[in-house]
Amino acid sequence: MKTVIVGGGVVGLASAYELAAAGCEVTVLEAAKAGAGASHGNAAKIALAESNPVPAPGVLLQGIRWMLKPDSPLSIHPSIAPGYLKFLLKMAMHCNARDFDAGLDLHLRLGEDANDLFDEYQRQGIDFEMHDRGVLLAFETKERFDEHSASLAVFEAAGHIPERLHGDAVHEAEPALSDRINHGLFFPNDRQIEPDSLTRALVAKIRELGGVVREDVSVRRFVSSGDTVTAVVTDDAEVLSADAVVIAAGVPTGELTGKLGHRLPIYSGKGYSIDYTPAPIELKTSLTLEDARVAVTPLDGMLRLAGTMEFGSRDDRVNDVRVDAIRRSAREAFHSWGEPQGENAPWAGSRPMTPDGLPLIGALKSAKNAYVNSGHSMLGLSLAPASAKVLTDIMLGRQSRLGRDHLAQVSPNRF
Ligand SMILES: Cc1cc2nc3c(=O)[nH]c(=O)nc-3n(C[C@H](O)[C@H](O)[C@H](O)COP(=O)(O)OP(=O)(O)OC[C@H]3O[C@@H](n4cnc5c(N)ncnc54)[C@H](O)[C@@H]3O)c2cc1C
């Protein structure tokens, strides 16, 4: 099957790899550079311990309260664009305990063998930087710790059992922490992957399997015959014929599916990261500073800070006030942070967000050979290999690793 994959982020590349490994003839068309979208500067975590869907009880209200706080970790871009307002309204309807638990259950099911899948990638010769330092969720107050712990039963039922740490035990787990941090949840199985090394290795593997990855080629529209897509057309008016098309274009996925008669509600959730080379402090583990919602990830020869969720941003410009808030959180959380040298230019990227916080994996109802793999929000790096397998099973008519209810939860046709 001749398959064109639109988008060379981690999700499009994982999909192309899985399809090529299953014998399909794959061509990835990437508008910029492979792996340079949201997949480039993310927090680098296989974040099993942080599988919570974004729409949680109280989240949008908190975002609205923080709209006038320029350095808040969560914000909502004010706009009266009808599609965006509809997206926010739909998200508000999912900010309840029942949908949150159902979404968390789906993420945990989808991600249950994430570590095994990455190990399998390495066995297949996909060579990337991976660490198994676990993650310490670090809290300043017992109140925040208790609030977060409310969802632990669901994690524990799925086998993610954290160590609960208080007082000195937190500082033993991570000696670099300042006295400001007094409580922690340590999840030993979470891993870290340097995302550029993964996307680079996937490109190499796809090519080794005979697939094609083309950069600086943007897909503008599709050619259809009845309800079947027959070709994609690029910005340069090049026409590439296809038996099947996979749209894995991150935030622009919705606009592209709109050209096939079904515009999916995907909006941006902008975030930032700052790299320090070399790392300014030695860390035993990777962390999330929960009060500031900032991830701190040690990688080879560097350390990455990442955070902030700005709903509905229309560009990837860096907001200095929010980046300063990320720097401040590190200064306050680590006793020897000081004024570190080696800071790289801050990066901004757009997470593909959906109203219910869950990915979109499967066939589009408006065109019988068009598929979507997108909307992974905060978890695209973690869930890319599993999502690629789910998609490939659907495309090839194989038994799915997900049950019927979970497949319905990720179906693009739920919107
Ligand atoms: C600050 C931050 C921290 C994060 N931390 C984590 C984390 O620790 N763990 C985790 O699992 N996830 C994390 N994420 C989320 C994760 O990065 C995303 O979910 C993931 O990168 C999405 O991958 P993608 O391939 O769907 O999208 P992208 O990486 O955005 O790729 C989409 C690609 O499609 C291309 N494209 C768009 N339109 C077209 C077109 N018309 N034609 C051709 N190509 C097109 C784009 O150029 C882009 O390269 C984080 C995100 C951010 C912003």
Image: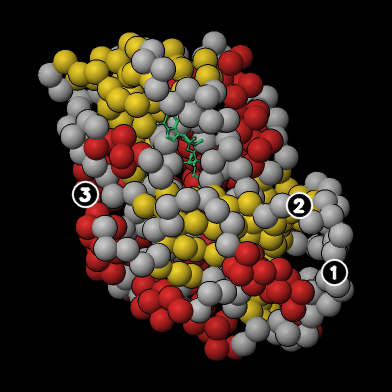
Between residue 239 and residue 375, name the one nearer to us: 239
Q: Earlier in the sequence, mark 3 or mark 2?
A: 2
Q: Is residue 305 left or right of residue 48?
A: right
**Residue drawn at the location 24% of the way across and 66% of the way down:** 89
The x, y position of residue 365, in whole percent, is: 18, 34
Q: Earlier in the sequence, mark 1 or mark 2?
A: 1
As drawn, the residue found furthest toward the left would be: 226
* Badge 2 density bin: few <14, some 14–19, many ≥20, Cα 10 Å: few
Q: Which mark is residue 415?
A: 3
Residue 403's place in the image compared with 159, above or below, is above
Q: Is residue 305 visible?
A: yes
Please state which of the two labelled residues, at mark 3 or mark 2, is closer to the viewer.
Answer: 2
Identify the secondary structure beneath mark 1.
Answer: loop
The x, y position of residue 349, in whole percent, is: 54, 50
Give the Cα separation between the discs numbered 3 and 1.
48 Å
Between residue 19 and residue 165, name the one nearer to us: 19
Q: Amino acid at mark 2?
A: Asn
The x, y position of residue 303, in whole percent, is: 77, 55
Q: Is residue 353 left or right of residue 17?
A: left
Q: Amino acid at mark 1?
A: Glu
Mark 1, residue position: 339
Residue 92's place in the image compared with 4, above or below, is below
Give the Cα separation between the discs numbered 3 and 2.
40 Å
Q: Quadrant of residue 340?
A: bottom right
Q: Which mark is residue 344?
A: 2
